Image (tube, rainbow, N blue to C red):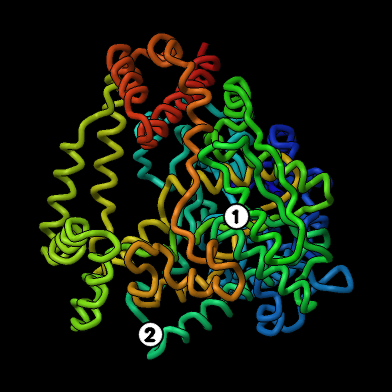
Amino acid sequence: MSGFCAVIRLDGAPPEADAVRTMAAAIPWRGPDGTAFAEAGSGAFAFLHLDATPDCGGALQPLTSTDGRVTILFDGWLANREDLVAALGSVPQTGPVVTDAELVLAAVRRWDSDAFARLDGDFAILAWDQAERRATMARDRTGLRPLTFRQDGARLIVCSDVAGIVALPDVPRRPDIDTLAGMASMEFFDESATFWQGIERVRRSHWLSIDAAGARKGERYWTPPLEVRFRYRDERQYVEEYAHLLTEAVRLCSRTHSPLACDVSGGQDSTALFAIADRLARSGRLQAPDLKGYTYVFEPGNPADEIAYARMAAQHVGRPVREIAPFRPNLDWFEQRVRDDMDMPLHANGAMAIAIGETMVADGCRVSLNGEGADEFFGGKSYYINELAKAGKFAALARMLAIDVRERGTAATLGNVVRSGIAPLAPLALRRRLRRRALRRRPYPDSFGPAARRGLDHARALEAAAYAGDIPNLARRGMFITLRDPFLARINDGINRQAGRIGYEVRSPFHNRKLLEFGFGMPEEMRGRGATIKYLHSMACEAWLPDPIAWRKDKPDFCDAFDRRLDHMESVFVRDLPGRHPEFFDADGMARQYDAYRRAGYWEKLRWPLWGMLIAGVLMDQADEVAA
């Protein structure tokens, strides 16, 4: 994936070209197809280019308007080029076809900050207005492209990656203890926070402007539907509309001049995208010259093994799928990645994808589709109880409860009735008080020392204040919280960095705006039903996949990816981490927590915090080294 960096003097001081070159040198992998530098007024800019999309305009950036007033940096691709061309009319262009970057520049010149709501696709944008000495940053609706910044008075530092900002010698490396404590407890609360004080993330679905006086102004430019918007009379209507929107999302994501790669895990989500892309290719509608599939192959008996499903999909679709052994690096590799990125890497299960990514790039691919977002936005929960009861649809509610009793059992169904039917009826003020009390009374991880406990207290207080309980529809409230989930934001950033380091970019059709708005607007009983977590998706998959995949209910177990390392690291947790950071980690408590992990068996939740503690320790090591 491409990237960019900039240093802007809002006070009109001379541009800092050397600083920008230092930043670009810290993230060279963002620009396998070249890096360009430019100055505009009191701003210095660099664009690092990965050539993945025809007419993306990366090679032309940094890009300045014909009147010399506005300079933009644009990392991403647009899904609604035709709509923008029609709305903008004549757009200045340098080649035979207007590029995405030129469309974005024209949109910002025409509509200023209102432009971002008109853009569909994945993007991170920096626009510098020299006349007003005002910088504006924006990110796409679900934050698939990262963007970080630091404001030091009249000096604004912007970069796709934290590593570019902390590379500057005058930027202090002070760890943000609140965020580190959140990672070490798996309680991420603040989407805008990074692991370093003074360095922030631009929020998803937001734009943020900083003017010559250093004053900030910004807002959320997109909010999904937060109530049921439509009810069809026939379930097949939902299936047809969903299939149409998902197919169009895949078509739009397929725009690349190289073979399109698909991760074909054997699960419902990525495998459905592969089948849809194949149909588009056979009908001449795929916007890529070829389609290639890839999957993991594990040793027999590994709980993560899905090869039988992947092979079934390949046979059904009639297109080969390459089988690749997962990448399994040692702990030193992960620690080096933290030192290089100054950020949270993908977890052990995510790093396995490096082997597939390297094979994709060796095969000439520059774009890969993944199934991220399907579980989060099209997986159902028991929220239908509250929704149907409020709508007075008691016959439909009775039918749904009967299915739950049959497939999940009476006890589980009664628990859902209490949690999703009765509890949400409490007044908002009461729910807020209960939420604050629950956070205050939530125990600390055994491993936490005094500094980590203080940081977690502060983070939990912020979470209580940001409670989204004022969204009346319980299902939409849960989906909206997921949409702004800080942990998922960091996972998306990690996916982006990992792909960029290899030399390709990832696109997620399930994050398409129209598809998301359909998902938020449809009734909850179509999302899940009984033991079928993704009911509507499974129904649609019947047209694309064999039934064992379309109605598959199990998930692979990737605990082995963690256990291969954690099982042999008792001394690291019990001695090394508390020894290096005694204010953050308590040695006796760490011994208890590691022992609980060893005795817990399958309970995966204990693995993630331990992994977070490892990463927190390495990040704090970097601050200690600088301080020393």
Residue 135 position (above or below residue 326): below
Extreme residue toward the right, this view: 96
| SS at circle 2 | loop
The answer to which image quadrant residue 498 occupies is: top right
In terms of depth relative to the viewer, which is nearer, 442 or 429?
A: 442
Q: Position of residue 586 (x, y in %)?
A: 31, 15
* Residue beneath the point at 24% across and 42% down: 461
Residue 266 position (above or below residue 31): below
Left or right of 308 in this view: 285 = right
The answer to which image quadrant residue 579 occupies is: top left
The answer to which image quadrant residue 75 occupies is: bottom right
Per the rendering, the mark at residue 230 is 2
Q: Which amino acid does label 1 sit on?
A: Tyr
Left or right of 151 in this view: 286 = right
Left or right of 392 in this view: 591 = right
Mark 1 closeness class: few <14, some 14–19, many ≥20 residues within 10 Å: many
Extreme residue toward the bottom, this view: 233
**Of marks 1 and 2, which one's residue comes earlier in the chain?**
2
Q: Where is residue 209 in the image (x, y as percent from the top left)?
A: 52, 57
Q: Name the residue under label 1.
A: 309
